[in-house]
Image: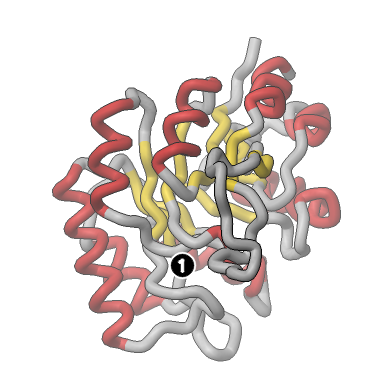
């Protein structure tokens, strides 16, 4: 019997609907896959929410690049949280860092105060100068979970750290592995007492349905459409 929750990041209405249909337990709704996720469209959220039954957590990130934001960017993030909260978002995903690689306590506290919904500290955690200190500060701020690849590019490389942080965190916060997560990782994670959730893109690239395209024109960095691989979702669900 599966005892963990599967969250998938989705970057469009199409992938959100397909992920829900395939059996994903929760969505992280984002825009701009190339930048690692930014704040999505309210319109996409509204339509998606009206068509599915599973929870939707919304990424709150005003731009790509780093996670050090100005006062005006923080103000915009707070407004986005309030707007999506009013629309019925089930939770939020964000993280603010200091220029020195620490947790920006003041900014993160302001963002958390903008909602009573659960908040995930995203992979900005992996960019911290002192992960153990950052973990305790994120817990103290009231975040519900941390999305992490273990301080490396992928869960595979960061496995040792993830297992350590799960043990340190205990029941105080959920450590949710994410970043190149594979069904094969579950054999290790399921042996850990405090493993509860995993974040996996379950993605593939599908061909465009268009019949004509001007090959002298390049309007996208992708040669296809980002899609959900239902077979990968099924593999996660079967472990």
Which residue is painted at 69% across and 25% down in the image? 236
Number of residue marks: 1
Which residue is painted at 43% across and 62% down in the image? 94
* 67 shown above or below 141: below
* 207 shown above or below 53: below
> Is residue 170 at least partly visible in the picture?
no
Classify the position of the N terminus by image quarter.
Answer: top right
Q: Quadrant of residue 47?
A: top left
Residue 69 percent location from the top left of the image: 41, 83
Q: Is residue 46 left or right of residue 64?
A: left
Residue located farthest toward the left when viewing the structure as drawn: 86
Residue 164 percent location from the top left of the image: 75, 51
Q: Is residue 81 left or right of residue 139?
A: left
Q: Nearer the viewer, residue 167 or 21?
A: 21
Residue pointed to by mark 1: 95
Q: Is residue 229 left or right of residue 54?
A: right
Residue located farthest toward the top when viewing the structure as drawn: 1
Q: Is residue 161 left or right of residue 80?
A: right
Classify the position of the C terminus by image quarter.
Answer: top right
Residue 161 percent location from the top left of the image: 77, 56
Residue 84 percent location from the top left of the image: 23, 52
> Is residue 193 at least partly visible in the picture?
yes
Q: Nearer the viewer, residue 239 or 9?
A: 9
Q: Nearer the viewer, residue 37 or 110?
A: 37
Numbered disc 1: secondary structure = loop
Which residue is painted at 55% across and 29% down in the image? 5
């Amino acid at each position: 019997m599966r005892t963990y929750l599967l969250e998938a990041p989705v970057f469009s209405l199409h992938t959100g609907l397909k992920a829900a249909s395939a059996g994903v337990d929760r969505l992280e709704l984002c825009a701009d896959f190339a930048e690692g996720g930014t704040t999505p469209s309210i319109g996409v959220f509204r339509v998606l929410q009206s068509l599915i039954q599973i929870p939707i957590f919304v990424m709150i990130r005003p731009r790509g690049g780093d996670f050090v934001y100005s006062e005006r960017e923080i103000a915009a993030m707070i407004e986005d949280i309030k707007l999506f909260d009013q629309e019925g978002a089930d939770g939020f995903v964000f993280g603010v860092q200091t220029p020195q690689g620490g947790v920006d306590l003041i900014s993160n506290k302001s963002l958390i105060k903008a909602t009573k919904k659960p908040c995930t500290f995203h992979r900005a955690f992996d960019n911290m100068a002192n992960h153990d200190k950052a973990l305790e500060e994120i817990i103290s701020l009231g975040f519900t979970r941390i999305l992490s690849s273990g301080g490396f590019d992928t869960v595979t490389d960061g496995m040792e750290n993830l297992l350590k942080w799960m043990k340190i965190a205990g029941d105080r916060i959920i450590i949710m592995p994410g970043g190149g997560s594979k069904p094969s990782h579950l054999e290790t994670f399921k042996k850990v007492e405090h493993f509860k959730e995993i974040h996996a893109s379950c993605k593939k690239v599908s061909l465009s349905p268009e019949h004509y395209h001007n090959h002298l024109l390049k309007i996208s960095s992708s040669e296809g459409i980002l899609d959900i691989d239902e077979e990968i979702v099924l593999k996660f669900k079967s472990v």
